[in-house]
Structure formats: C-alpha cells, structure tokens
Image (tube, rainbow, N blue to C red):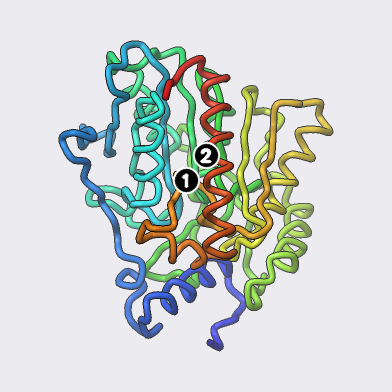
Amino acid sequence: MGLARKIGCGCLVMLLLLLAAAAGIWVWKPWTQIVPLEMVEPTAAQGERVDTGDVLGNFYPAKGASNGPGVLLIGGSEGGLGSVMTRLALALQDDGFSVLHQSYWRAPGQPERLEDIRLETFQRGLSWLRARPEVDPARTAMIGWSRGTEATQLLAIRDKSIKAIVLGMPGNAVWPGFSWDEPWKQFGSPWSWRGEELPFLDLGGIQTMGGDMDETWREIAAREKQHPEATIPITDVAVPVLMICGESDIVWPSCQMGRAIADAAAQAGKDDARLLAFPDAGHYAFGAPVSEDDEAFDKLDNLGGSPEGNADALRQSYREMVAFLRDTTGGGEN
C-alpha cells in the first residue's frame, strides 16, 4: 500500500494497515476509528467493573473460590479492555483462577499515549486483587500480551511477590512509546518506575518492508547491541516464565525476541524460562481457544498465520498455560 517508511514503530504500522485492510477501511480515516477503543463490560454473572480511581479493570472471580490463585492480566497496544484478553480472562475464570483484567492506557481518565506508564499502576492492580477474599495474596501470577509483556517482565524484576509470569507474543526490550493518533511516530519511554523513565530502544531508521520479521529482527538486534540498557534483563526475573509466540507473527518478531529471552536465560543458568513457538500462527496465537464455529475464527489470520494454525496454537498454548499456572500458583481447577 506504499506506506513502507522509516519510522520508529514500523511493526505497529504494519498491524494498522492489516487491520484496515481486513476491515475494508480506507487508510486516510483516523487510526482511532480503524482500531477503536474497546471497554468490554462484564455481565453480573461473569464479574464486575473495577474503578477505584487507582485501578481500572474487570474482575472475574473464580466460582466458589476462597483463598485461591489470582492472575493480573494486561493487554498491549490496543489499550482499554479488549475482547481478546477478555476471552482469556473468562477461560481462566472457568479453570479456577480469579482474574483482574487491568486497563492502563487509552481508556477514559487514563494516559492517551503508551508513554510514561508507571509500573506502580500494576502494583496497585495486584494489591487490589490480593485484597479480594477469593484470592490468596501469596498465590498471584501476572500475564501480559504483546507490549504488555514488557511491563510484565519489568514489574516481576521489581516486585518479588509475583509467583510466575506468562508472556504472550513477547518482547525482549523496551520499545518506544506509541499513540494511535500518530502511529508512525515514536514517543518517549513507555514505562517509568518511582518517577524515573526506563531506558528504551530508539527504533528510528528501522524500515519495515512487507512484514519481513527476520529482517526487522536483524536490525533490532543490531540496535540492541548498541544500546543494551534497553534490553530487559530476564536473568533478573526470579520466577518461572512461560512464553508463547507465533512464527508467522506480522506485528513484531515475537518468536525471535522470545528465543533471545530464552537464550539469555539459558546462558545465565536460569532453567525455568520456556518458549512455545507455533509455525503457522501469528499475533492472535495467544489467548483462549477459539472454535471453528466462533465468529472470531475467521479473523484469527488477520495478524499472521492461518485460522487453523492460530486455532491449533490457541488450544495447545492455553492448555500449557493453565498447567503452568497451576504448577506455579498451586491452584485452579476445572
């Protein structure tokens, strides 16, 4: 579509173009209309909306739970409380986990850009979750998808109370800030801790050409060597890590970055970081299983892979995720 250009967040622009094409929307419409904000509201039977001023999200308590395992779940560049992570929260709820799906940007009253998001935001989410009678505060894990995997790792390094983390379509470094109003532009650091912005990788000059993630990764890896401070030190994550990626991801090189995380962990003797990679799957290979008669099935290939490949990856990875969470938090039942 002639939009390949030197930009800071090229992979995200590819995502935007693909979403626009899939929706049949001309690219000159506002990007916020192409990827609208979702704020899914749970039914009374499912859970409740949480809005304390400090914590905004949806809480899905496990049925009949008392002092059971809890999960803090966050999405990525979509912002708000989207349907993909909502499906995952509901599936985990059915499997015995009480889940807080937390919004941290783009929703009303929250930052309009993925920039300078305080990691303390997620600590407040964990505190809220742990105060619930359904949750044992000593048995909480955190799950992040896409850009949310950056925050998940960064918080696990700083908050030793988290028992395990799951990274869906993982990133191994902090990428620049992002905005749907100007998706071609890179902003400052997306994350801060105790008032200090965290180092991020300047991606200016890296060109995205037709979703060639191998080439994108080679350029990113070279940039990381020049700026190692932006790489997230997985060796400082002192808890088990499960990563899930799609080899056909066209949003960003999640499997290449996942392997970089796994290699760094192995070299340091950290033997509890595991990567599940699925060849015919893309960015939607993370979440809850989707059946062929589900209306979401035909859209699974929008961000890489085939519908069948993504659906198979979702089935396998979700099963592994639940087993991992049960093992690390000591709970959850069918």
Which residue is at the far front?
293
- Kindly check if marks 2 and 1 are in contact, taking CB atoms under 8 A apart as contact: yes
Residue type (three-letter) at the residue carrying disc 2: Tyr
Q: Position of residue 328 (x, y in %)?
A: 56, 20
Mark 1 neighbour density, 10 Å: few (under 14) some (14–19) many (20 or more): many
Q: Position of residue 83 (x, y in %)?
A: 34, 52
Q: Quadrant of the C terminus?
A: top left
Which residue is at the far left?
44
In the picture shown, does residue 216 fall above or below 275?
below
Which image quadrant for residue 274?
top right
Residue type (three-letter) at the residue carrying disc 1: Gly
Residue at mark 1? 287
Which image quadrant for residue 130?
top left
Looking at this view, is 262 or 104 the one in front?
262
Residue at mark 2? 318
In the picture shown, does residue 139 fall above or below 27?
above
Looking at this view, is 142 or 245 the one in front?
245
CA–CA distance between discs 2 and 1? Answer: 7 Å
Secondary structure under the numbered disc 1 in the rendered image: loop
In the picture shown, does residue 332 fall above or below 79?
above
In the picture shown, does residue 227 fall above or below 219?
above
